[in-house]
Amino acid sequence: MNDYNAVMLRLAPTTAIALVCLLSIGCVERRLLITSEPAGALVYLNDQEVGRTPLEVPFTWYGTYDVRLERDGYQTVQTQQVAERPWWETPGPDLFAEAMPDKRVEIAWHLKMTPAQPASETDPERVLDFADQLRELNRRD
């Protein structure tokens, strides 16, 4: 057996192991799970409409997101929520975590909405001022 064949025989197991590892590399699936009380609120992430609660959407980066919820009969909720990076996604351990098949990160946010205040419960003085403004506008026409 010549030197080339001997080297190839010694490298064959290492090459096979490397190939299996390379082919088994999985992707990390990142998902935001957003729920609200009450359900059915329209959700905006960073001013992009993404659907109604309960909702599950993919995300690509960790950090702070602007979240807005809207629903008829409720006050609009505007807040910031943080998608925190798990320890195994930090540089270093992430090299090994990426090699694990079927990795999934789920971050759940639950937001409560407040019912809108009925007109009868608003400040009577403001209602009267508004009525006066409407009368003035009608007189001009």
Image (spheres, helix red, strand yellow):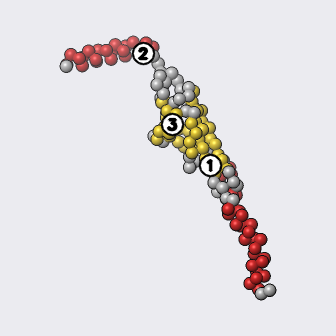
- Residue 5 vs 89, above or below: the answer is below
Neighbours of disc 1 within 10 Å: few (<14), some (14-19), many (20+): few
Residue 132 vs residue 12, the one in the foreground:
12
Let me know if residue 13 appears in the view: yes
User: Which kind of residue does numbered mark 1 sit on?
Assistant: Glu
Q: Compute the Cα span from label 1 to label 2.
A: 46 Å
The residue at the far front in this view is: 1
Q: Secondary structure at mark 3?
A: strand
Residue 51: which numbered mark, if any? 3
Q: Are marks 2 and 3 in contact (CB under 8 Å)?
A: no
User: Which kind of residue does numbered mark 3 sit on?
Assistant: Gly
Residue 71 vs residue 137, the one in the foreground:
71
Among the two numbered marks 1 and 2 on one chain, the one whose residue lies closer to the N terminus: 1
Name the side, left or right, on which 79 lies relative to 126: right
Viewer-nearest of discs 1 and 2? 1
The x and y percentages for residue 16 are 74, 69
Residue 29: which numbered mark, if any? 1
Residue 119: which numbered mark, if any? 2
Viewer-nearest of discs 2 and 3? 3
Q: Compute the Cα span from label 2 to label 3.
A: 29 Å
Among the two numbered marks 2 and 3 on one chain, the one whose residue lies closer to the N terminus: 3
Among the two numbered marks 3 and 1 on one chain, the one whose residue lies closer to the N terminus: 1
Quadrant into which the C terminus falls: top left
Q: Secondary structure at mark 1?
A: strand
- Residue 64 vs 71, above or below: the answer is below
The x and y percentages for residue 33 are 60, 38
The x and y percentages for residue 90 are 65, 53
Residue 79: which numbered mark, if any? none
Q: Secondary structure at mark 2?
A: helix
Q: Kindly identify the residue that appears in the image at 70 percent across and 66 percent down.
A: 19
User: Which kind of residue does numbered mark 2 sit on?
Assistant: Ala
